[in-house]
Amino acid sequence: MEYTDLAREIFKKDRYATGLTGIVIDHVDNHEAVCTMKVTEHHCNARKVAMGGALFTLADFSAAVAANSDSLADEDLHWVSLESNIHYLSPAPLGSTLRATSLTLKHGRTTALYQTIIESPDKGRVAVVETTMIYV
């Protein structure tokens, strides 16, 4: 089974990310992942743009998929977020589809650093997130 299909199968158990928020895993490779999320009314604040928490969830999930990508065959999901820093750059309006691309900057034995860029077709870069992962 290919990485992406395997990741979808395993991470569908993350009901909050895949069920409630509707995040879709589009691509997974060795320590990288691309996930998308369509901004619906459930993601929006009173201004009808995605709340920061919705963007953060997308980035956190994408980084987790990337960090655990090399152990999917064993369902050995030990990498979790330790710390994140998010920079909001542009609003993500209702109806837009956001694309989160998570790439590894450093992957060690017990900690790893990922950068996730969230983009929108109409707004460009929406957020940049750096996440430190820890092996537990």
Image (cartoon, helix red, strand yellow):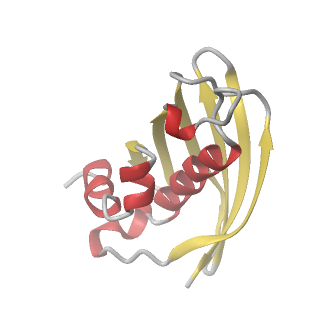
Residue visible at 51% across and 22% down in the picture: 95
Give the number of callouts: 0
Residue 116 x, y percent position in the rendering: 64, 46
Seen in the picture, residue 23 relative to 95 is either above or below; the reply is below
Using residue 47 as the reference point, say whether residue 96 is left or right of it. left
Quarter of the image for residue 100 reads: top right
Residue 21 appears in the rendering: yes
Seen in the picture, residue 40 relative to 62 is either above or below; the reply is above
Using residue 78 as the reference point, say whether residue 105 is left or right of it. right
Q: Residue furthest front?
A: 46
- Which one is nearer the viewer's eye here, 21 or 70? 21
Residue visible at 25% across and 50% down in the picture: 5
The quadrant of the picture occupied by the N terminus is bottom left
Residue 55 x, y percent position in the rendering: 63, 43
Residue 30 x, y percent position in the rendering: 45, 55
Residue 31 x, y percent position in the rendering: 51, 56
- Which one is nearer the viewer's eye here, 73 or 89? 89
The quadrant of the picture occupied by the C terminus is bottom right
Residue 29 appears in the rendering: no
Residue visible at 37% across and 60% down in the picture: 15
- Which one is nearer the viewer's eye here, 15 or 99? 15
Residue visible at 63% across and 35% down in the picture: 50
Quarter of the image for residue 26 reads: top left
